[in-house]
């Protein structure tokens, strides 16, 4: 099993959700986060004062998939989240040693 963590632009969330649904991914965890990479933030003027916005709003999506679902899920996220502009985000793939559904105590692939 693999865990996919994707950091994307907030307005791309619905597109990514639909793309994952189309490839059979039923559940996900979504968190509002802030960060920056090469984008480095930007400066804004508020009430006459200029200040730097270092951390930009992003969305972090976490999905646990079987090894067989991995390539399809990653491709779906890439397709749906890409704008071609700086700040599109990143995808991280991690190994998952075990998964347990609390309600039924199903384990591993049966739990996801």
Image: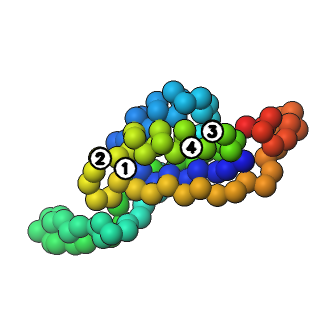
Please report contact status of discs 3 and 1: CB closer than 8 Å, yes or no. Answer: no
Task: Please tell me whether mark 3 or mark 1 is closer to you in this view.
Answer: 3
Task: Please tell me whether mark 3 or mark 2 is closer to you in this view.
Answer: 3
SS at circle 4: helix
C-alpha span from label 3 to label 1: 23 Å
Please report contact status of discs 4 and 3: CB closer than 8 Å, yes or no. Answer: yes
Residue drawn at point x = 35 percent, y = 54 percent: 88
Instruction: Judge from the rendering whether residue 24 lies leftward or rightward of residue 45; answer left or right.
Output: right
- Could you tell me if residue 33 is visible in this image? yes
User: Which residue in the protein does label 4 denote?
Assistant: 71
Q: Nearer the viewer, residue 8 or 72?
A: 72
Quarter residue 24 falls in: top right
C-alpha span from label 4 to label 1: 21 Å
The spot of residue 5 in percent (x, y) is 56, 53
Q: Nearer the viewer, residue 66 or 41?
A: 66
C-alpha span from label 1 to label 2: 9 Å
Q: Which mark is residue 9?
A: 1
Please tell me how crowded label 3 is: few (under 14), some (14-19), or many (20+) other residues with Cα within 10 Å: some
Please report contact status of discs 1 and 2: CB closer than 8 Å, yes or no. Answer: yes
Instruction: Judge from the rendering whether residue 32 lies leftward or rightward of residue 71; answer left or right.
Output: left
Task: Please tell me whether mark 1 or mark 2 is closer to you in this view.
Answer: 2
SS at circle 3: loop
Q: Earlier in the sequence, mark 2 or mark 4?
A: 4
Quarter residue 23 falls in: top right
Please report contact status of discs 2 and 4: CB closer than 8 Å, yes or no. Answer: no
C-alpha span from label 3 to label 2: 24 Å
C-alpha span from label 4 to label 3: 6 Å
Q: Earlier in the sequence, mark 3 or mark 1?
A: 1
Q: Earlier in the sequence, mark 1 or mark 2?
A: 1
Indicate whether 110 appears above or below 60: above
User: Which residue in the protein does label 2 denote?
Assistant: 83
């Amino acid at each position: 099993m693999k865990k996919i963590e994707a950091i994307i632009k907030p307005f791309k969330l619905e597109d990514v959700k639909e793309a994952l649904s189309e490839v059979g991914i039923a559940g996900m965890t979504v968190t509002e986060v802030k960060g920056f990479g090469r984008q480095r933030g930007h400066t804004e003027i508020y009430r006459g004062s200029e200040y730097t916005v270092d951390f930009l709003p992003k969305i972090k999506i976490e999905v646990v998939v079987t090894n067989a679902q991995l390539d399809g899920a990653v491709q779906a996220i890439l397709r749906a989240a890409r704008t071609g502009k700086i700040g599109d985000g990143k995808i991280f793939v991690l190994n998952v040693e075990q998964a347990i559904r609390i309600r039924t105590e199903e384990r591993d692939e049966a739990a996801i």
